[in-house]
Structure formats: structure tokens, C-alpha cells
Amino acid sequence: VTRSLLIGSGAYLPERILSNAELAAMVDTDDAWITARTGIRQRHIAAEGECTSDLAIAASRRALEAAGREPKDIDLIVLATATPDYTFPATAATVQASLGVRKGAAFDIQAVCSGFVYAMAVADNFIKAGQHKRALVIGAETFSRILDWQDRTTCVLFGDGAGAVVLEAGKGAGTSADRGVLTTHLHTDGRHHDLLYVDGGPSKTQTVGHLRMAGREVFRHAVVNLAEVVGEALAATGLTPADLDWIVPHQANLRIIDGTARKLGLDLSKVVVTVDRHGNTSAASVPLALAEAMADGRIKPGQLVLLEAMGGGFTWGSCLVRI
Ligand code: ACO
């Protein structure tokens, strides 16, 4: 059977780091509250004029280098973002032009924090169908641009960044011992719009808008939905939590990450955590964490890695991949 092999990853974070202490000078909050409730100590913020495409391009270059591939080898770009450079064209098209990719399709995916898992599922299915051979799959965000910096309940949670992987068509025996993407599972429940949304947009308000969130409600849904979609990935492959070498979760809140790991009976030492240093970078959080753990040698070839995420929509999903 055809498998989408994950042959390289890369990450990029803007230079500027915003600490909890600096935030405490901007809104009525403090380091102790943010750390205890979220696990976040700092986040990166894009420089003025630095756009989502800039972060995506930098991460993509690193992913291509790690994979030993060149832009001419790529025939599909799927970019997950909720903070595109422009309403249109897609940020993926800007990335394509800048990298010098000339073949195939490039488009954006909008599933907020689950965006990268959605993008992996889309690229994997295109590759398995034989329509494309080598995909750049990117999660890139500049959430700092849609935060209400007066709202302490949201502005302390998010950061900017980008991560990318290269997927390449290969062969497998069709078992869970194969390398590559083994299974993907996506869900949406559009009834919860008001719990997490941006209060602007081209059609409705002709403004960009700001992120609005009922944090406690989102938290409750997140733990339930993530446990469900992780269970689906394991059931589809006949594997158990003990078979997983690593979990790379969406990095929204250390308590959600902890809760999900506990539900699976997994030790936190098998969970890649970056939320303390990156905050919640939405669609970028999973590929940022994955790239970090691959680059520092924690995640090794042959290991089984579960990616999972949940975000606005609500959307949620999982992607099980053997590196
Ligand atoms: N500093 C100090 N106090 C604060 C802050 C702050 N930054 N923000 C809120 N508070 C106050 C609230 O006003 C409230 O005060 P009150 O009791 O006087 O009304 C109190 O702290 C408790 O607020 P809660 O919202 O109940 O606190 P909670 O423990 O739920 O933590 C948080 C809030 C961190 C947002 C949590 O609910 C959460 O992480 N939810 C998940 C949402 C999330 O991660 N969304 C990301 C996008 S979707 C996704 O990625 C899954």
C-alpha cells in the first residue's frame, strides 16, 4: 500500500519573546496565575511587518533541509492557518512563490488549532490516492494580530510561530509496523461557535476582529473530545496506549495535556511539551513541538507518534504516524 512517509520537519519562532512579567505590566494578571492555570511562561511575538507567510517560509526551508529535498521536489503545499496574510490569495500561494515551488497545488486549511492535523489528513489522502507525490504540510500563525490585548482572559494564552513537515509517497505492507502516516481522524461540531471565535471577518463585519473565548467551557470539551479521537486512532490500528512512543498534543494548556495523558494512562515523559515556552500557537503548535523533538533526538526513526489537537469550530482530530 502507499504510505505518506514523514521525512523531515522544521520550525521557526519569531525572535521577540514576551514574558508573563511583561504581560503583567499590560493587563491585570501575574506570572503566578498564568503559570498555575496554563503552564505558560513565555510566548514569541512576530515583529512588525513579519507575516504568517514569513514564519511559514522559514519553517518550510528548515523542513526541506532536514528532509534532504528541494523546492522542485514538492508538488503539494497544504498550509493550516487562521491568521492568513490576506483574505485571499491563500498564504500557501505566497509560500509557494517564495520557495520557488512551481508544480502542483497550494492552498490553505482553516480548522484553527486543529489545522495542522487537518492538513496532515488532507495531504496524506492526496498522496495515498496517487494524486501528489511530495507535500509540504505547514502550520503557521500570527495570533498576536487577532488578540484583544486588553482582555486578560485570552491575551496571555497565545503566541506566534510556524512548523512544517515533508510527506513523501512510499510503500508499506499495510500494517502498523509500516513507516509513515498510519491513520487520521477528523471531527467538527459547528454548534459551539460562540465558545471560541473571532468577532470579525470579511463577509460578516468587514473587519479582522478579535479572538473571543469562554475558556472554562472550551477546556471541558477539549479533554472529552481529545480522549475520543485518540481512542479512534488506536482502535483503527489495533494498538494500545502502551504502543505509543510519543504524544505530540496541541499545546493550549498544560492542564489539558496532563488530563489527556492521564486518561490514556501515559506518563508525561512520553508527551512533548512546548506550551511553557511557546504558549498556544494554534495550528503551528503541533508541528513546532514535533520538529523540536525530532531535532533534539527525542523522537527517533521507527517510533510511533500520535499527533492530536482541538480548536475553534469546534474541530478536533488525530494523526498516528510512524517516523
Ligand atoms: N490573570 C489573572 N486572573 C485571570 C486571568 C488572568 N490572565 N484570566 C482570567 N482570570 C480570572 C477570571 O476573571 C476569573 O476570576 P473570577 O473568578 O473573579 O471571575 C478567574 O481568573 C478564574 O477564571 P476561569 O476562566 O474560571 O479560569 P480557568 O481555571 O478556567 O482558566 C483558562 C482559564 C486558562 C483560559 C482555561 O479555562 C483554559 O485553558 N481553557 C482552555 C481554553 C483554551 O486553551 N483555548 C485555546 C484555544 S482552543 C484550544 O486550543 C483547545
Image (cartoon, rainbow, N blue to C red):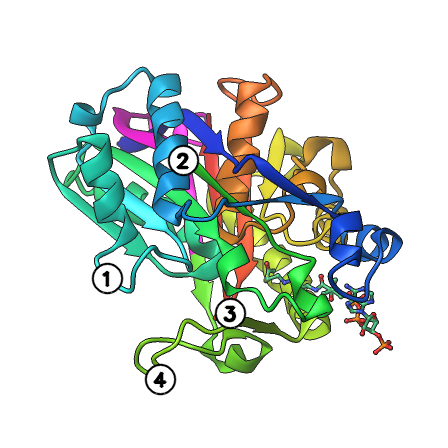
Gap between marks 1 and 4, in whole Å?
Answer: 16 Å
Using residue 58 as the reference point, say whether residue 125 is left or right of it.
left
Q: Is residue 243 visible?
A: yes
Ranked by sequence position, the earlier of labels 3 and 4 is: 4
Bounds of the magenta segment: 165-185
Disc 2 crowd rating (10 Å Cα; few below 14, some 14-19, many 20+) is many
Q: Does the magenta portion include 175?
A: yes
Q: Which mark is residue 88?
A: 1
Residue assigned mark 3: 314
Using residue 283 as the reference point, say whether residue 239 is left or right of it.
right
Q: Residue at x 82, y 62 (%)?
A: 29
Foreground residue among 110 and 202: 202
Residue assigned mark 2: 164
Ranked by sequence position, the earlier of labels 2 and 4 is: 2
Local secondary structure at mark 4: loop
Disc 4 crowd rating (10 Å Cα; few below 14, some 14-19, many 20+) is few
